[in-house]
Image (cartoon, grey):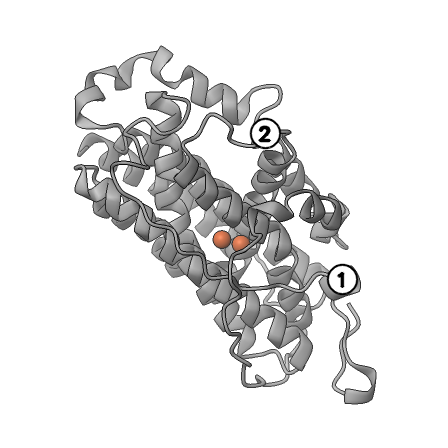
């Protein structure tokens, strides 16, 4: 990425080079019993519970992304890169707030959203406690790629989420559009701070290992918890989960791109735009953000100069990550048993 501080030769980030301006928008989503049916996705218990779980996941993950962006921003001295990182953070903060609106509706109908948030947050906190600050940021990096690829998969369909009720569908499609719009932002902030060398790569891979663990452990547990009381008996039946598993992990499953991206991420020169041309999708999906007002953008204060050196990953870091896998599985099992 071309970055420097000479105003006469302003930095062009990879997003800017493609004409992408990360744009925080402020939608006015409102959720209530009339526009959020109990089984709002495909009239299916398992699929709806999975997407309600995804809403809880997103609500917590967005705060992680904002915190990761803030840590990077403190070390980004380039105005253009800092501005893009700040715009990304603003988008994520608004995503979190909008998912919280939908989640409040789920709380009102008795779903254990707060317990699920607490469980999810405990995974994030434990990852940071074991891995430290750089792992926390790298976890955010990988999470961004997984969600960005889910967004590509959903929006590449001719009628994305056609079986979903209109209100939650609009929330997710607006969110997914912005995930593609900013898919490179955190990565480019990271490269500005830590560069593209082997240490930065190793840290990205370690962060991805934490991210894969957190996603693999939390998604089934959150879906389990989001089944309404009236359907609790059905949680042990395979048929309850079959449609959701096929939707996410089947031949044309929505997580196919996330798996491909995370396999590509260990490459030394990996960049999110290697996977797709984001512009094609953004043009195609523009209608999902049309008419949503732009939020005022806050100009960030320039940070300190980056060191451009990532912390080295050693055997102890790998051992801590393995410990996190075991800890997460036990934590998820306890959480599910309590629901
Ligand atoms: Fe988001
Ligand atoms: Fe994001």
Residue 20 in the figure: left or right of residue 172: right
Q: Residues within 10 Å of mark 1 (few under 14, many from 20)?
A: few
Q: Can the viewer see residue 132 in this picture?
A: no
Quarter of the figure with residue 303: bottom right
Residue at 42% in and 22% down: 42
The outermost residue toward the front is 291
Q: Earlier in the sequence, mark 2 or mark 1?
A: 1
Q: Residues within 10 Å of mark 2 (few under 14, many from 20)?
A: few
Q: Can the viewer see residue 5 in this picture?
A: yes
Residue 130's disc number: none
Image spot of residue 27 (x, y percent): 44, 56
Residue at 20% in and 16% down: 233
- Tell me how far mark 2 sits from mark 1, CA to CA: 26 Å
Q: Could you say whether the residue bearing mark 2 is in a helix, strand or loop? A: loop
Q: Nearer the viewer, mark 2 or mark 1?
A: 2
Residue 19's disc number: 1
Which is nearer the eye, 325 or 38? 38
The outermost residue toward the right is 9
Which is nearer the eye, 264 or 301? 301
């Amino acid at each position: 990425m071309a970055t420097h501080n000479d105003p006469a030769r302003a930095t062009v980030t990879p997003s800017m080079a493609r004409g992408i301006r990360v744009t925080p928008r402020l939608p006015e989503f409102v959720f209530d019993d009339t526009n959020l049916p109990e089984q709002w996705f495909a009239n299916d218990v398992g699929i709806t519970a999975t997407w309600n779980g995804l809403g809880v996941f997103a609500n917590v993950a967005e705060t992680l992304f904002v915190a990761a962006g803030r840590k990077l921003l403190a070390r980004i001295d380039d105005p253009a890169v800092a501005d893009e990182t700040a715009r990304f953070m603003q988008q994520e903060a608004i995503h979190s707030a909008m998912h919280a609106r939908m989640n409040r509706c789920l709380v009102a109908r008795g779903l254990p959203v707060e317990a699920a948030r607490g469980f999810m947050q405990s995974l994030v906190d434990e990852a940071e406690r074991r891995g430290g600050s750089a792992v926390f940021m790298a976890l955010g990096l990988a999470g961004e790629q997984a969600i960005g690829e889910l967004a590509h998969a959903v929006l590449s369909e001719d009628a994305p989420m056609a079986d979903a009720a209109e209100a939650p569908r609009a929330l997710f499609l607006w969110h997914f559009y912005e995930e593609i719009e900013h898919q490179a932002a955190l990565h480019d902030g990271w490269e500005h701070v830590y560069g593209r060398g082997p240490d930065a790569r190793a840290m990205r891979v370690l962060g991805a290992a934490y991210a894969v663990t957190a996603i693999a452990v939390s998604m089934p547990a959150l879906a389990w918890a989001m089944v309404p009381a009236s359907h609790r008996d059905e949680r042990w039946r395979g048929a309850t989960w079959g449609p959701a598993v096929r939707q996410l992990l089947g031949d044309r499953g929505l997580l196919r791109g996330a798996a491909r991206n995370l396999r590509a991420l260990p490459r030394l020169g990996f960049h999110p735009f290697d996977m797709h041309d984001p512009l094609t999708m953004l043009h195609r999906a523009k209608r999902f953000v049309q008419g949503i007002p732009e939020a005022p953008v806050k100009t960030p204060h320039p940070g300190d100069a980056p060191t451009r050196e990532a912390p080295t990953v050693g055997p102890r870091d790998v051992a801590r990550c393995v410990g996190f896998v075991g800890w997460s599985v036990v934590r998820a099992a306890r959480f599910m048993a309590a629901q």
